[in-house]
Amino acid sequence: MKISVKNILTEIKGISANSRLIENGYAYVAMRGAKFNGEDFIEEAVKRGAKYIILQNNNLHEDRNRANFIYVDNPRQTLSQLASSFYVPQPANIVTVTGTNGKTSTANLFMQLTNTNHYKSAAIGTLGLTSFDALNGLEDFLNHDSALTSPDSVTTNNILYNLAKNNFTHVAIESSSHGLSQYRLDGINFKAAGFTNLSRDHLDYHGTMAAYFNAKKRLFSEVIGIGTTVVLNSDIPEFNEIYQLTKARGLKVIEYGKNARDIRIIAKNNNTLKLALFGKKIESVVQLTGEFQLYNLTCAIGLSIGCGLNESQLVSALPNLKSITGRVEKIAAANLRNDIFIDYAHTPDALKKVLSDLKHVCNGRLILVFGCGGDRDQGKRQIMGIIAEEYADVNIVTDDNPRNEDPALIRKEIMASMKNPVEIGNRKEAIHYAISILQPQDIILIAGKGHENYQIIGNEKIYFSDREIVLSAV
């Protein structure tokens, strides 16, 4: 039986892929996962009152007296498409951004640009649901740190529906490679979609860089609609491929970067940023640290233009922009004479960029505290050690989120090609040591965790904040 979304929508009271959440009149989507097979819980869903069972395998026993069985080619995609059609209305201006690094900053900067212009706006991603406005009925998601950059499709569409009910008009969603490959964002009506950059990450899941890139490209080849504006970084090697892909679909493209034709970065001296916006030169004060944040900002500007904001609105908002939590975040303390930054950089490219930017403004030693997560891509550990060796003057290798790996072995892999690293497994002690050796004009970067307020050791999630450790130490 072929699914008819329209017919089902008029008959169901809810949707879920979790049999425990099924209520009378719901549609249950049985999906096969890495750990569980949703088809094993069909009987439970039926007992709980499921009206429709949507699944891929048509060889299962059917009890049509209690539920209607519907077979589809892709249950995950069907779940997402059903959710986006069920949870309506949604905000009129939904944008998304994908890429290895910069998604959270870009989404936050889009939220700031639109909010400054008096639009109710929000962002969904690594930081959970964030907004400068009150979120009635969505307090559980507000500033909630999620394990998933892209939440499951039912949660995302439920959030969008509730945002619309609260008169939110602009929302930025981070699109992770996992979310794209698992069809979590299919069906959402995106006004604009951006691409930041591509570098090594998540190879423990995707296996190869080609597969990782293909997951990212799905956003532009399949997920977004014909009316979506695409915002592309002109300065990355992948630009031409994505540009040709989107132009072949007849999509409007806005370029940003130093070589861009549309939003061109000219220069930034101290806090003064010079841009060329569709040929017109503009100049504004911008309080953001690091060249990579200029790329995130210009991507956010492109997404905002895709939603109809004009030059005057954007230029007026630039001086009001603030740094993002855990992204090159400078720790402020009255008795702190040195600059100490925390940053989420946990990939080789992100670490290289933030170290390079800080190196240019550091008149003393650049001291780095960092580690690598366990149960993740092992291949990047030695690479990050090499980058640290190249850019930092003092390297303190510590634990990140070791999870179920031996922390000492993780540190050993990081230090394999380093000359004289300081190894301190206890992250709190590592931060204290970095502060204790500070000399005038030195800068400390504590990398890897940024906004996170926990550390995962084994299966235990322990409260831990780099920011709080610094403040208590100074």
Image: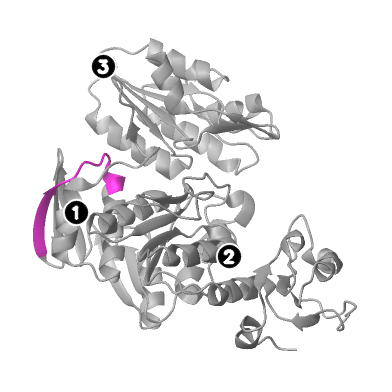
> How far across and down, in percent of the image, does residue 161 sit?
49, 67
In the rendered view, would you say 146 is above or below 465? Answer: below
Please name whichever residue, 440 or 9, is drawn nearer the observer in this view of the structure. Answer: 9
In the image, the segment drawn in magenta is 280-293
In the rendered view, would you say 375 is above or below 151? Answer: above
Which residue is the extreme one toward the front? Answer: 136
What element does badge 3 sit on? loop
In the rendered view, would you say 66 is above or below 258? Answer: below
Q: In which quarter of the image is residue 120?
A: bottom left
Q: Pointers 1 and 2 in contact (CB under 8 A)? A: no
Residue to which mark 1 is pinned? 317
Q: Residue at x 29, y 37 (%)?
A: 357
The amino acid type found where label 3 is placed reads Arg
Q: In which quarter of the image is residue 83?
A: bottom right
In the rendered view, would you say 390 is above or below 224? Answer: above
**Residue 415 counted in the magenta span:** no
The amino acid type found where label 2 is placed reads Ser
Local packing at callout 2 (Cα closer than 10 Å; few below 14, some 14-19, many 20+) is many
> How far across and down, in percent of the image, does residue 182 sit?
61, 64
